[in-house]
Amino acid sequence: MTAPKLGWWWVATPVLLAGLVLFALDRPRLGGFVLAGCLGLAAVLRLVLPPSASGGLVVRSRAVDVGTMALLGGALFVITAVLDLRPLR
């Protein structure tokens, strides 16, 4: 038995890591936007690539995968945009 190929999943991985590094460097707004972009990129990749090339992005049906990633990416974008980072007085 062999492990399934990850396919184009690796394209979104550096963007995900960049977002996590930005969070670790105390840049939560920029990190949130980068993570939202990563989810959007993953949704587009899942939408346009065939299942054999999508690899690790294939979890359920194409519509469910794309819808879930797009919804979560949009929600994260909105949450990041309205996030109030001013210190309390």
Image (cartoon, helix red, strand yellow):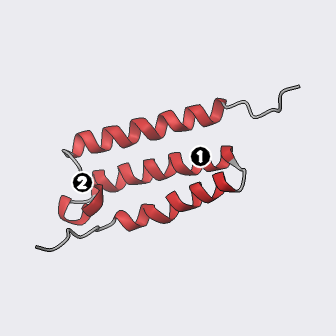
Q: Name the residue rendered at 20%, 70% in the picture.
A: 3
What whole-number distance in Å separates the C-alpha atoms at marks 1 and 2? 24 Å
> Mark 1 sits on what residue?
33
The outermost residue toward the front is: 1
Q: How many marks?
A: 2
Quadrant of the image for the N terminus? bottom left
Badge 2 density bin: few <14, some 14–19, many ≥20, Cα 10 Å: some
Q: Name the residue rendered at 67%, 45% in the picture.
A: 28
Q: What amino acid is at disc 1?
A: Phe
The relative height of residue 64 versus residue 42 in the rendered view (above or below) is above
The outermost residue toward the top is: 89
The relative height of residue 34 versus residue 18 in the rendered view (above or below) is above
> Mark 2 sits on what residue?
58
Q: Name the residue rendered at 71%, 56% in the picture.
A: 25
The image quadrant that residue 24 belongs to is bottom right
SS for dot 1: helix
Q: Observer-nearest residue: 74 or 1?
A: 1
**Tags 1 and 2 touching, CB below 8 Å:** no
The outermost residue toward the bottom is: 2
Q: Is residue 3 left or right of residue 84?
A: left
The outermost residue toward the right is: 89
Badge 1 density bin: few <14, some 14–19, many ≥20, Cα 10 Å: many
Q: Residue 77: x and y, percent?
A: 55, 38
Q: Residue 45: x and y, percent?
A: 34, 56
SS for dot 2: loop
Q: What amino acid is at disc 2?
A: Val
The relative height of residue 87 versus residue 61 in the rendered view (above or below) is above
